Image (cartoon, grey):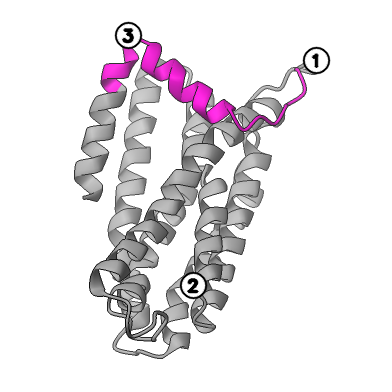
Amino acid sequence: ALLLTIFVDAVGWGLIFPSLTPLLIQNTSGIFAASVSSASRNLQFEWVVALYSIFMLIGAPLLGSLSDQIGRRPVLLICLIGSTFSYILAAIGVSMNNLTLIILSRIIGGLTAGSMPIAQSALLDLSVYATQKAKRLSWVTLASNLGFACGPILGALVLGNKTSLFAYSLPFWLGAGLAVAGVFLIMRGFKESLELTPNAPVFRFHWHQCFSEFSSIIQDRVNRYYWLLLMLSLIAYSG
């Protein structure tokens, strides 16, 4: 169930690009005024895409800490329900040709985009031996990469050659359906992996927590080089 959830989440991430590219860069729906230059549309597209990752940077540490307090299962459900809502909001925004709703959907999607690292944590919870951890983390990489590869393909197949606003919204509706499927997978196929302590401290919501996590990585002389290497590889991958 966890690997299927990771796959579904990764598929949903790539579904949107076949719709966003003609909408924002090519301006086929007229979402921008005719006077807006191509460079400005490209910049708007990059911001819409980047907002997801920016708010994921804020939300993921908070959701990770919350999962340590109340368990992996409920936080995974929170993430997937948030993703469902963000896809639905994006689909409505595309159908209405409303850029504000599309941007808001990306913010909500980023804030609740913690399902993949939490699913990784759950797999590590279930691993007893170090060899099991390495093997299961490789499964996570396989499931996520398959999802990233299949997402744009599925989005393009759903969109086809249609150019109506409803057609552009179809990949987002499919993303919402996949997120709902993830909710059912977790509800039916995943039992809590974390042993909760009865006297655990109450979770406190602090916006600065994501920045403190980032600071701790930078100050760690051993791990910061691995983090830098990972960051450079992801920049190359997404660029």
Where on the picture, by quarter, is residue 196?
top right
Circle 2: element type: helix
Residue holding disc 3 = 221
The answer to the question of whether label 1 and label 3 lie on touching residues, with beta carbons closer than 8 A, is no
Where on the picture, by quarter, is residue 202?
top right
* Residue lying at the far front of the rendered structure: 35
Circle 3: element type: loop
Task: Judge by depth and name the residue closer to the eye, 58 or 15.
Answer: 58
Circle 1: element type: loop
Q: Give how far across and how far down residue 172 sits, in percent.
A: 48, 71
Residue 6 covered by magenta stretch: no
Position of residue 78 relative to residue 11, above or below, is above
Mark 1 vs mark 3: give the one in front: 3
Mark 2 vs mark 3: give the one in front: 2
Residue 217 seen in this snapshot: yes
**The label number, if any, that marks residue 199 in the structure image:** 1
Residue holding disc 2 = 99
Dot 1, how many residues are within 10 Å of its Cα: few (below 14), some (14-19), or many (20+)?
few
Q: At 74% from the left edge and 17% from the top edge, which residue is drawn?
A: 197
Q: Give the magenta range.
A: 201-226
Q: Give how far across and how far down residue 52 sits, in percent.
A: 45, 52
* Residue lying at the far top of the rendered structure: 221
In the drawing, does residue 102 fall left or right of residue 189?
Answer: left
Kind of residue at badge 1: Asn
